Amino acid sequence: MLKEPRILAGNYLIKQLPTATVFLNRKFEIVHASDTWISYFYVKDHDLIGTSIFQFLGCAKQEWRLALGKCLKGAPTKTVKECHLDELGNEKWFQWSAIPWYDEEENIVGVIVQNEDVTEKMNNDLSLEKLHIVIREQSEIAKIGNWEYSASKDKLSWCDMTRKIHGVSTDFVPTLEKVIDFYKTGYSKNTISMVVNRAISEGTSWREKLQIVTPKGAEKWIIAAGKPIFKNEEFVGLIGTYQDVNDEVLTDMRTRENEKLLKTLIDHLPLNVFIKDSQFRKILANKAECDYLGANGPEEVIGKTDEDFYDKETARATRKDDLDVMTLLKPILGEERTSIKKGGEKVSFLTSKIPLIADDGSAYGLVGISMDITGLKQKEEELMDLINVTSLQNKKLINFAHIVSHNLRSHAANFSMLLDFLVSEKDEEEKRNIIEMLLGASDNLMETLDNLNEVVAIRTNVNREMEAVNINGRIRSVLQGLSSLIKENNATIENTVPDDLCIEGVPAYIESIFINLITNAIKYRSPNRDPKIKISAVKENDRTLLRVADNGLGIDLKKYGDKLFGMYKTFHDNKDAKGIGLYITKNQIEAMNGKVKTFSEVGKGTTFNISFDEKN
Amino acid sequence: MKRIDSIFIVDDDPITVFGIRKMLDFVVECRDISSYKNGKLALDQIHQRLEANEQVPDVIFLDINMPIMDGWQFLEEFIRLPIHKKIRINIITSSIDDLDQKNWMRYKSMTEHPISFNNKPLKKHEIAEITKAA
């Protein structure tokens, strides 16, 4: 006979049970339920008593049915956990457990089911599990291992990562002494011994970048960090971490080596190298650039712009170059630029500017490389000067050669022609006439040769020793020699040259120059007035100017200016004119590094300015 | 013997003038041979003859290096003169300067008058060759 539990509806004792409890008959219908159980599961709308318990179970229903069946035969159930949504829709986790329900005669009349709210516990378990996973992942990724030392048990425990970092297997038993031995002898071992001892005695923590050596002999950079633990001011242990930073340290060291190499290279290049950012500020300057800018080091250059170092014009020009390079993204390569610093120092550069281009295709700065070519430029200019002087002299030489050739040829032609006539001439009178002409031609040839000799002498004695020549002394001697000519022509000479004026020159040349200019002034006098010649001198700094001015015929310089000092050029119908005087005068002046300039007005007179620059 | 109406010799060297005159005696018949010491004197004479409607020379012997107005300056002005007949101009020089050769080519291209370039010394047969009305 099946025993039926006595239904004690409203049994007050059961109602007040603190845990969620429900009593089931053998058909697993609810007979009693505690208020707590009702508050967990009961929905008011239907009658609770007599309801099958399985209505309150979800996916665990089948498992639970089997369990309850066993329970009716006297076996206590294992617990199951199941999620249940409360009225507000929140997840609630309940643990279900059941025991057999005995009556006074020890008959099993049903099952007593208890429910425990395990939501919080479940959540805690989950977060703990998550935390473990995160820590493990982190330790894997960051290669950080941890360890713990308990002083009371003298036991050191290592996590898997710590073992991996040290290159030992899971059965390795670490001790404090063994650990110290992992450190590389020298700085690393000394440092770790010191910091651990200090941690124990003084309570300080540590963090050091050190090297360990694995059992296989591999050296490895790690960051060892740790701190002591005290309980009631008594040392109880140590905890700490190891971080494998070998790759980072090696990469870092390599990078630094590369940087050093690059810096050494850039600093010792005999070129000015700099980098500017998009705001035209220097962010790198090598030694040559710093030296050039007069800075004691890069720190005096970095962050500054060209406006800080150059004059306005130069800064504007470099700014334009920079802008072009960065906006057009086209480099400037090996172009000549002249920079003037604020102090006025002028330097010529061969400059290249190359844009630095970011991933998005825009320029974020530029690299500049400049070579100082000031010396080169100067040499070039000197060379050009030399070429000009040489070509001028060459031209003069060719001109002179033509003159010589022309003169000798014309004399030779005359001789040849006259002799030809003489040979075939019958008439005695004409023969005498021709011989007369031959004699004249011979005299002319001798004179021409003398003139040419004189010119050659002046030209070949260009390096003749110069001496200080007192100008007035020479003028006086010249005037004395020309006194009869001056008298005959009723000429007046006004000489205002100071007595102490001297120039570096050749005395004979200076006399010759004055003789020529004064006789010319008289020879080409105006028929309307007596000749008046003014000789004066001005000395300015290193420059001496001698001036000979007359009131003679004058000459149309527009017409004849370029031929005035030419050889065998005459301009007036004067029977004494040979066209050699001024040519020699000019050569003598130039042989003493002087220059001559002429001013003239037809009918009024001519002025010769002869200047000597001591610097030349 | 050829007959030429008028010949000018423009040269400042009396020996050359003498030589040319003497050689001309052998090769042409000319009653009007005159000489001038520089270009200016010759040019003045031509101006005068043009104004007086007298005959201008048929042949001019012209030196280059002369004072006051040299051969080139003379040519520069001469080729601008309103002369309708062609006048033969014989440059006589001892210059072997390239520049003179170039000047000759230049003036030759600038005028209808025939211009010849001759180096000294001139031989009789050369004179005969270049002394004819253009």
Image (cartoon, coloured by chain):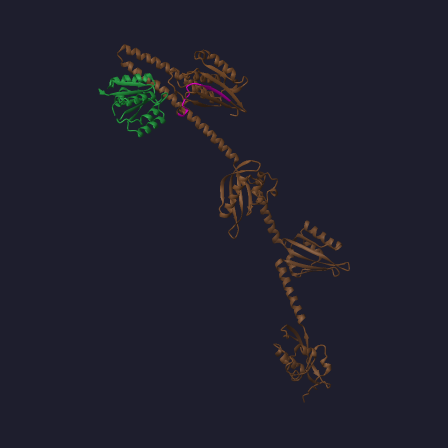
Chain colours: A brown, B green
- The answer to whether residue A485 is above or below residue A296 is above
Q: Nearer the viewer, residue B96 or A556?
A: A556
Q: Quadrant of residue B62?
A: top left
Drawn side of residue A428 relative to residue A467, left or right:
left
**Image location of residue A556, percent across then percent down:** 40, 23
Drawn side of residue B21 relative to residue A241, left or right:
left
**Image location of residue A1, percent across then percent down:** 67, 89
Q: Quadrant of residue A117?
A: bottom right
Q: Residue at x 77, y 60 (%)?
A: A232
The answer to whether residue A554 is magenta is yes
Q: Nearer the viewer, residue B32 or A397?
A: B32
Residue that protrudes farthest toward the bottom in the picture? A1
The answer to whether residue A389 is magenta is no
**Image location of residue A228, percent across then percent down:** 73, 57
Q: Quadrant of residue A245?
A: bottom right
Drawn side of residue A434 relative to residue A269, left or right:
left
The residue stretch that appears in magenta: A545-558
Residue that protrudes farthest toward the left in the picture? B1
**Image location of residue A7, percent across then percent down:** 70, 86
- The answer to whether residue B12 is above or below residue A174 is above
- The answer to whether residue A337 is above or below residue A480 is below
**Does the image show residue B122?**
no
